[in-house]
Image: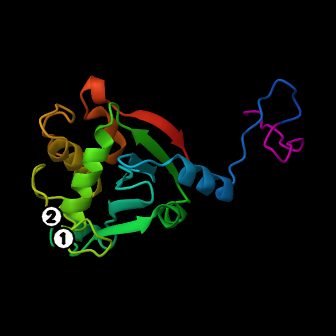
Amino acid sequence: MAKKEANYGAMPDGSGTNPDTPKIEARSAAGNVNRFVRDIRKGDILIVKSGGFGHAAIATTNNYILEMHGGGNIINWAVTGIPNNNRQYATRTWINNHIKNWTEIWRPRQGVGSSAANYADYKFWSSTHGLKKNRHITYGLGAGPRTTDPNYCSKMVWQSFWFGTGSKNVATGTPAFITPNALPTYFYKSYAPYKVGSY
């Protein structure tokens, strides 16, 4: 019979009674939100670790985040689509909506994030770059990687770098399906995003 470990001596910070046991860093929701708002920059890629493929979004400014949030019946993702699914939130509101899961900030190199963010804002939110939405994108998984409507979260982010960075070779290939967790791998090395942090 396997020996069960007793946890009676565990401390509030998660450390045990053994002095060699490392302490587990506590995660404060308020502290996480404040760090996220402080660290986010225009053009950053956001990856939410929500199980499965995860979720992705892009910061269109330092203060706003754009996403295709999906939701609803999973059959609609591939068959009927979900109309008018693109949403933009203030940074603090967005992270509060996703605080139950860890979110990673990935920042592309050589400043290409800004032009990708401008493209995302124009193509997937407002043709006038205004706060009022006039683009109404359907959520759907079925269309190819270069089709902008219908779209889904990680494909929208990838397209912002594929189409939005001009003649630079930033994003690689045209993958059949772009998963959120793999987004940082779809870049050429000189532009490959680095991880800013987890929140």
Q: Viewer-proximal residue, 42 or 175?
A: 42
**Main secondary structure type of the part rendered in magenta:** loop
Give the color scheme: rainbow, by chain, secondary structure or one colour. rainbow
Q: Is residue 79 left or right of residue 29?
A: left
Classify mark 2: helix, strand or loop.
loop
Say if 193 sits above or below 123 in the image: above
Q: Viewer-proximal residue, 31 or 134?
A: 134
User: Looking at the image, which residue is at 28% across and 24% down?
Assistant: 189
Q: Are marks 2 and 1 in contact (CB under 8 Å)?
A: yes
Which amino acid type corresponds to the residue marked 1 in the rendered image? Gly
Which amino acid type corresponds to the residue marked 2 in the rendered image? Pro
Q: Quadrant of residue 130?
A: bottom left
User: How many numbered badges does the structure rendering display?
Assistant: 2
From the image, state whether disc 2 or disc 1 is nearer to you.
2
| Mark 2 neighbour class, 10 Å CA radius: few under 14, some 14 to 19, many 20 or more | many
Residue 155 point in image, percent of width and height: 22, 51
Judging by the rendered image, the residue that carries numbered circle 1 is 81
Q: Can you say which quadrant of the picture contains the N terminus?
A: top right
Residue 112 point in image, percent of width and height: 28, 38
User: Looking at the image, which residue is at 87% across and 28% down?
Assistant: 18
Say if 28 sits above or below 24 in the image: below
Magenta residue span: 1-15
Residue 197 point in image, percent of width and height: 53, 39
Residue 99 point in image, percent of width and height: 55, 59
Q: Mark on residue 150?
A: 2
User: Looking at the image, which residue is at 16% across and 31% down?
Assistant: 169
